[in-house]
Image: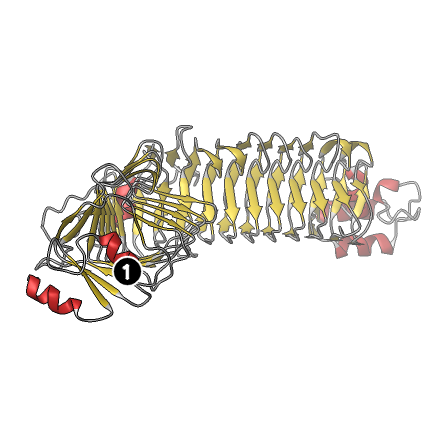
Amino acid sequence: MGLAMWAERSATADTITVCASGCDYSDIQSAIDASANGDVIEIAEGTYAPSATLNTMGKAITIRGSTNLDGTPATVIDGQGKRRVFQMNNGEGPGTVLENLVITGGYASSGGGLYLENSSPTLTNCTVSGNTASLFGGGLDLYYSSPTLTNCTVSGNTATDGGGLLLWGSSPTLTGCLLCANAASSGPQVHFVLNSTLLGEGNCFTSSCEDSDGDGWPDKCGSIGDGVHEVPGEYATIEEAIASAGAGDVVLVAAGTYAPSATLNTMGKAITIRGATNPDGTPATVIDGQGQRGVFLIASGEGPGTVLENLLITGGNANYGGGVYLASSSPTLTNCTVSGNAATNKGGGLYLYYSGPTLTNCTVNGNTATSSSGGGLFLYYSSPTLTSCTVSGNMATEYGGGGLDLLYSSPTLTNCTVSGNTGYGGGGGLRLWRSNSTLTNCTVSGNTANSSAYGGGGLLLLESSPALTGCTVSGNAATNKGGGLYLDGATTAPTVLDSVVCSNTAASSPQVYGSGGGWSNTCISDDCASCLRSLGDLNGDWMVDGEDLLMLLAAWGDPGAWQSDVNGDGEVDGEDLAAILGNWGPLP
């Protein structure tokens, strides 16, 4: 754009021009200082090197660069490796706009290109490239900020963590954006922290910016071919296949062990990541974090259309969610095993934050929360659905909830087994705090609570009122009280129907410690055999069937045949027959 045109523009009150000479200002910050809400700062093509970080100071203004003939930004703002390029920390909203700018050469401890704090501006057709952060967010560091980025490129930035983007409590919306070739020495190119999410569509995140056909979009972006992306047949890595997949596509991962170089991020895509199976149906595709990183990050608003299937997720290590970290997402996990992962804080296997995933036929075992709670799963304000799942052999070394630790959560468990877990702060199997879960036809057995303060080898209930129907709580142990269930506080009132609580051990009150709730047709006994007999299971095989009926008929009318006296009234008669017929089938 010629100088005459820039001079003409300067006559317009709400337009401020910036160029090397002949415009309103020759430096960008001076133009910002002189602007008012609603103004537009037009910057001529060329390279500008501010002497200090540019700060929009909370103003609802548009800073617009020029474009090349192909529409790419022609206005370059260069931090020269000395300073951050842009900073917005005064509550900027969508009315603060950056457009047609190349932001490069920035350097800072965080947010080398841009640092946003409690601000949510609009970026359109911008390129954030070649910036560096010594710690977080080489390209952009978002702190409790939710900007909107449209048709932007974030590439070639570096940081210790979050080479391209670092999101802390932030929920940006990206549409038609490209993130490629950003590098982080100890984390992914996009790192989500504290309930961060990423929304939008038509984006591509990939490790390579290579564009062999010159169409302006990397080769690894976009849905390709028949929508099935094979690893390793078509793609060497799972992350490359994910980056290339579009909505509805399948990433098909062959049998074998894969060790991603960064945590796998589904990036909000409604895709299926499907592994292979062994002859017995168990997962034959292993994804191993090698004790160096979390394995999966699902935190971009994913719904049920984002599917993990037939995967063994192992070797993960993270502060939260060693195997799988979920935030504000509700994906589907089918026939997956999450095993041998660790969290230094919560959720050795899975960490759920405001999430409602569906898990079917999954196994969560042998995971550890090394300094907090939720060895298998930690749930915070989450409502997952678990069907035919097993949670076993997990450990929480400090605050409890060896199998599952629930805080303000309402999961639904059906036909699940929670067994052999250890919670050193109570709640060997499950610890519920202000949570009201539903358990139907579930078994909670063989769990241990090693706590001097709380018990609950099977379940520890703190201000919680779960519903148990057709469940068995047996063989659990507590060093304190309530080997089976520990009920704490007047606001704890479980509903227990058609269930069995038996053969649990503790220093005192081995079956149930505490009072309250509604208990119906439930047997509570130190001896499971007596409970089974009271339900008509005369041979102790947890099934009321023809064998029990034959035992009853053989003892009919014999007052000494106490083993067949279902109701314990000293007679084997029609009432006992009615009890057997009424409980016919498998017991809880």
Q: Is residue 306 left or right of residue 507?
A: left
* 151 vs 13, nearest the viewer: 13
Q: Quadrant of residue 156?
A: top left
Quadrant location, the N terminus: bottom left
Q: Is residue 38 visible?
A: yes
Q: Is residue 150 visible?
A: no
Looking at the image, residue 390 lies above or below residue 385: above
* 489 vs 554, nearest the viewer: 489
* 376 vs 439, nearest the viewer: 376
- What residue lies at 12% left-to-right and 55% top-to-bottom? 45
Marker count (numbered): 1
Looking at the image, residue 417 lies above or below residue 25: above
Q: Report the residue that reaches farthest toward the bottom.
A: 12
Q: Give the class, few, some or many, for how many residues have Cα within 10 Å of label 1's Cα (few <14, many ≥20).
A: few
Residue 528 horizontal/vertical position (percent): 77, 38
Q: Is residue 332 left or right of residue 272?
A: right
Mark 1 residue type? Ala
Residue 490 horizontal/vertical position (percent): 80, 50
Q: Secondary structure at mark 1?
A: helix
Q: Quadrant of residue 63?
A: bottom left
Q: Is residue 473 left or right of residue 58?
A: right
Residue 495 horizontal/vertical position (percent): 74, 54
- What residue lies at 81% left-to-right and 54% top-to-bottom? 577
Residue 289 horizontal/vertical position (percent): 39, 32
- What residue lies at 51% left-to-right and 48% top-to-bottom? 353
* 109 vs 468, nearest the viewer: 109
Pointer 1 residue: 34
- What residue lies at 69% left-to-right and 32% top-to-bottom? 449
Scheme of image coloration: secondary structure
